Amino acid sequence: MTAFPTIFDKLENLRYLNLSEAGFTGQIPIGISRLTRLVTLDLSIDTLFGTPLKLEKPNLKTLLQVLSMSDCYLSGPIHSSLSRLRSLSVIRLDRNNLSGLIPQFFTKFPNLTCLSLSSVNFSGPIPSFSSSINLRELILALNQLNRTIHSTDWTGFSKLEIIGLGNNKLSGTISPTLLGISSLRTLSLSHNQFNGSIGDFHGKASSLINTLDLSNNMLQGQFSMFVFELHGLTSLNLSSNNFSGLIPVSAFQNLRNMSALGLSYNRWSIDATTTNISSLSFPTLAELDLASCNLTEFPGFLKNQIKIPDWIWKPVDLARLNLFQNFLVGFERPLKNITSSLEILDLHGNQLQGEIPILSNAAYLDYSNNNFNSVLPAQIGDSLQYGFFFSLSNNNIQGSIPESICNSKCLEVLDLSNNSLSGPIPQCLFQISRSLWVLNLRRSNLSGIISDTFSKSCRLQTLNLNQNRLEGKVPKSLVNCKMVKLLDIGNNHINDSFPCHLKNIATLRVLVLRSNKFNGHIDCSGNNSGWPMLHILDLASNNFSGKLHLTCLRTLDAMQSNPDKNQSELQYLQFEALGVYLELVKIPILFTSIGISCNNFEGSIPDVIGKFKELHCLNFSHNAFTGPIPSSFGNLQELESLDLSSNSLRSEIPLQLANLNFLSCLNVSNNKLVGPIPTSTQLLSFSEASFENLLELSFSSYLWRWRIWYFERIDCALSRLFPRLGRETKKHGRRAKQNQRRRTQHGIKE
């Protein structure tokens, strides 16, 4: 990369300058604006910065017609001197960091044919372009534009072909004059807040429209029959609205050019009552999205077949099929030796059973949450040569994991959790961790050891082996996985000392070792590393012993004061491939927990715990702790649950606990505490079971209720940590209203 050369300033007769993707860096030379004979200027995809072409001496005779500066690092508002370039016909400034309103002078260029300002952070309303009668392309997607678009007069346009306003905050109804532009070919209004119906467009829409995307809005009403008047449609997406009514099967034969159809997430159904459906001609689709459409059989408007028909695997053009969250129960015939053009197949959340279909060309296969009960084919890996996502979670798959799975060299997400598998985890599966991002084998009945063969190029970010029958030790080579965020090997038979080598994985956010046979101290002498990002630490139900030392605790920075308090509640590991947006890992930033119950820890509880101001759940129960409850616990203002029961704690309950306003579960029973309960509306709201048997050991009914709450909360948090398509996540509320609901749920009286 080199700085932008100034030599071009001297070429006064230069008419065409294209330096896109040249790798130039630095400030755009202001002298370039003196090139008054320049007709085309293209500086796209360079690491340039500054205000877009600020004119040093505005010259009304400047001939510049094409200005393209997309994918630079331009920032700030567009300089007003640009309005002097009256000859401009094409302006492309996409994917920069501009700000403010769309300049009004953009509507005054008499020769403007293309204005593309997508993803530049503009806000406010869309100005009226009614005087830009030569406009052919208007692309303002991926901004923060708001208000309605009624103020724009669309009736005067006779050349406008492309309108892209998706991914903004536009609202109101969709104006009939917008669809009525006679030259219109593409209209995208997706991911906005438009409401109302589109039933009054009959006879008003342009007959030239080939792409119509109204998805992800708040549109409602009966299915609009005007859509079937648009015989040139190649792509139609009405998904994620609130449309209702019946879609007549016969009408689809009018859309013979259709290649992509999205009808997911609405409240309509297919009317397939046509008696002579075999005589009708239907479109050949490349993409089909019918998710959550209450289907009980394969839709008749494609073929008059029950279940998922055999012919669906044969079309040479169908690349994407999405039928998830319906009520489909099976396939037309056994699925063996399938050849198909499908690259993306999503059938999760149905009631499918029998054998799983394996497609040799598929890159994305999601069969989770069904009733499949077959074994994994021996050569499954050879059939997944191009697969990057494969999920069979929450089925009844049996048998062992074939060694051939390691032949899937592109595999990034493998989720076989919650099945009835058997046998060991193939050793080679850990060796291909150089490609795997997510390996989820939770609750799969697997046995054997965790092989010590993790590659030095390991890319794993999620490893979940919880609730199997694994034995042995925590492999030393796991330290090669420097990017791991979630490590869960709980509920197995691991027999090992505390895995101090894991302290070298600084990215860890969740570590679960519970219910194994770990033993010994947890302090790591000589290892000054730590887990500054850790939010959930669960060591419960092992044989750990000794005291809690400061060296074990002081590196847990994320549980202490959080400077980014207003950040999003969840952080995501995301990527996009083949048009599929994935949220692979969801880490609940605002839920932090330490659980070390049911071990043999002794000594006093370190006062430093009082600095963990982001803690929501703390469980030190069923150990041998002595001494007082630290008064510093009163600083844990976010604490919702505290269990110190069944220890040998002495002295009084600290008065400072009365300051814990969000505390909804408390148990200090079965200790040697004395004195009164601190006067506090919050503490006095708990039942007597929270404080009983402070001089002798017994279990209280409240202890049982507390554990139900604790495990429900942990399970809820961990359930968010595994591969899923982009889905909405409820936020963790922690205020008084929710505390009240929890008390009611668990039978705790005020």
Image (cartoon, rainbow, N blue to C red):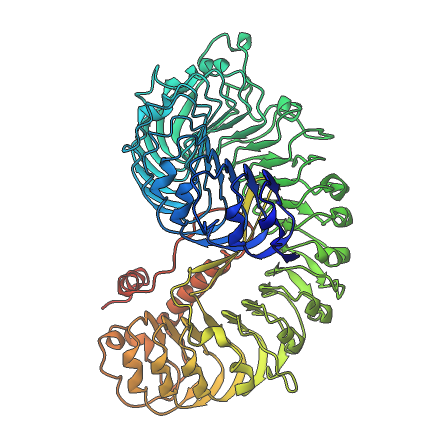
Quarter holding the C terminus? Answer: bottom left
- Place of residue 408 in the rendered image (x, y in percent of width and height, measured from the top left): 73, 46
- Place of residue 159 in the rendered image (x, y in percent of width and height, measured from the top left): 43, 22
Pick the front one: 623 or 714: 714
Image-quadrant location for residue 143 = top left
> Does 136 sit above or below residue 118?
above
- Place of residue 262 in the rendered image (x, y in percent of width and height, measured from the top left): 48, 30
Image mark count: 0
> Does 139 sit above or below residue 304?
below
Say which residue appears at 55% left-offset and 54% top-offset: 48
Pick the front one: 682 or 651: 682
Say which residue appears at 71% left-offset and 47% top-offset: 410
Image-quadrant location for residue 525 = bottom right
Compared across the picture, whether 310 is left or right of 133 comes to right
- Place of residue 451 in the rendered image (x, y in percent of width and height, measured from the top left): 74, 63
Pick the front one: 258 or 102: 102
> Does 136 sit above or below residue 44?
above
Say which residue appears at 46% left-offset and 71% top-offset: 593
Image-quadrant location for residue 696 = bottom left
> Does 405 sit above or below residue 608?
above
